[in-house]
């Protein structure tokens, strides 16, 4: 089982006109936009503080197709991902999202599983079982979690979330087959194309 070290992640749904990049970023193999957003996202890594900052526009990570910025690493097999997250600024969009994403490729309608914190505090395990299918969701009772963990055991995805210093609450879904080789990483969506 692989464990990606805990890092502090600062996320922003602020707009950016910086072109998306697909080069290494800290622990990640690359980053860039998924889908066809109106405005490009961006990502930075501060090695001294071990913080990632993502900015992004994009309509959603939901329904049959996604638009978001993604910093990813190629992994194989089972793993556990854990980080602390924070939206920068209050924001006006309740469904902006940040969290861990697992998907087989960068196609906008690819199957996926994610552990997403929403702008209004909702934390959910979201998943699309097959290419182009409707996204499904299991909500956590924890609101405003700032520690998010996503674990994969075969086709089972386990979301564990908490407010820093408090116990984890766990939600899981089985039978989400994304293949053995996947892209895993941090995803950010403003839920606003502009």
Image: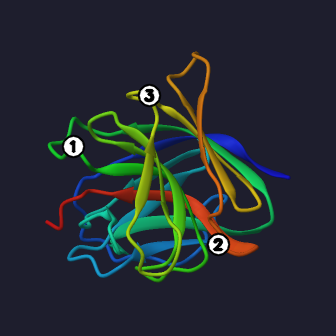
Q: Tell which circle, 3 or 1, labels the residue nearer the N-terminal end.
A: 1
Q: Residues within 10 Å of mark 2 (few under 14, many from 20)?
A: many
In the rendered structure, the answer to whether residue 159 lies left or right of residue 96 reads: right
What residue lies at 23% left-to-right and 66% top-to-bottom? 59
Seen in the picture, residue 166 relative to 55 is either above or below; the reply is: above
In the rendered structure, the answer to whether residue 28 lies left or right of residue 123 reads: right
Q: How many marks?
A: 3
**SS for callout 1:** loop
Return the x and y of residue 130 as percentages of the image width and height: 52, 76
Seen in the picture, residue 148 relative to 132 is either above or below; the reply is: above
Q: Residues within 10 Å of mark 1 (few under 14, many from 20)?
A: few
- Which residue is the site of mark 3? 141
- Which residue is the site of mark 1? 94
Contact? badges 1 and 2 (CB < 8 Å)? no
For the residues marked 1 and 2, what is the alpha-carbon distance in whole angstroms? 28 Å
For the residues marked 3 and 1, what is the alpha-carbon distance in whole angstroms? 17 Å
Of the pair 24 and 194, the residue shown nearer to us: 194
What residue lies at 47% left-to-right and 38% top-to-bottom? 85
**SS for callout 2:** loop
* Mark identifier at residue 128: none
Return the x and y of residue 47 as percentages of the image width and height: 61, 49
For the residues marked 3 and 2, what is the alpha-carbon distance in whole angstroms? 26 Å
Return the x and y of residue 70 as percentages of the image width and height: 47, 66
Seen in the picture, residue 163 relative to 170 is either above or below; the reply is: above
Which colour scheme appears in the figure? rainbow
Q: Quadrant of the C terminus?
A: bottom left
- Which residue is the site of mark 2? 178
Q: Tell which circle, 3 or 2, labels the residue nearer the N-terminal end.
A: 3
Q: Nearer the viewer, mark 1 or mark 2?
A: 2
What residue lies at 34% left-to-right and 77% top-to-bottom? 19
Of the pair 139 and 69, the residue shown nearer to us: 139
Please tell me in which quadrant of the rendered image residue 23 appears: bottom right
């Amino acid at each position: 089982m692989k464990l990606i070290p805990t890092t502090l992640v600062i996320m922003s749904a602020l707009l950016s006109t910086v072109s998306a990049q697909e080069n290494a970023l800290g622990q990640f193999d690359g980053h860039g936009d998924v889908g066809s957003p109106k405005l490009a996202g961006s990502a930075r890594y501060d090695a001294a503080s071990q913080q990632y900052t993502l900015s992004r526009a994009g309509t959603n990570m939901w329904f049959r197709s996604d638009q978001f910025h993604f910093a990813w690493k190629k992994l194989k097999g089972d793993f556990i991902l854990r980080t602390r997250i924070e939206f920068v600024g209050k924001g006006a969009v309740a469904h902006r999202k940040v969290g861990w994403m697992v998907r087989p490729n960068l196609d906008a309608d690819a199957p996926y599983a994610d552990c997403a914190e929403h702008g209004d505090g909702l934390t959910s395990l979201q998943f699309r079982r097959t290419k182009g299918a409707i996204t499904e969701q299991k909500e956590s009772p924890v609101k405003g979690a700032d520690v998010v963990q996503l674990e994969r055991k075969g086709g089972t995805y386990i979301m564990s979330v908490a407010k820093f210093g408090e116990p984890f609450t766990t939600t899981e879904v089985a039978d989400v087959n994304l293949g053995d080789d996947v892209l895993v990483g941090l995803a950010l969506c403003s839920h606003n194309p502009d």
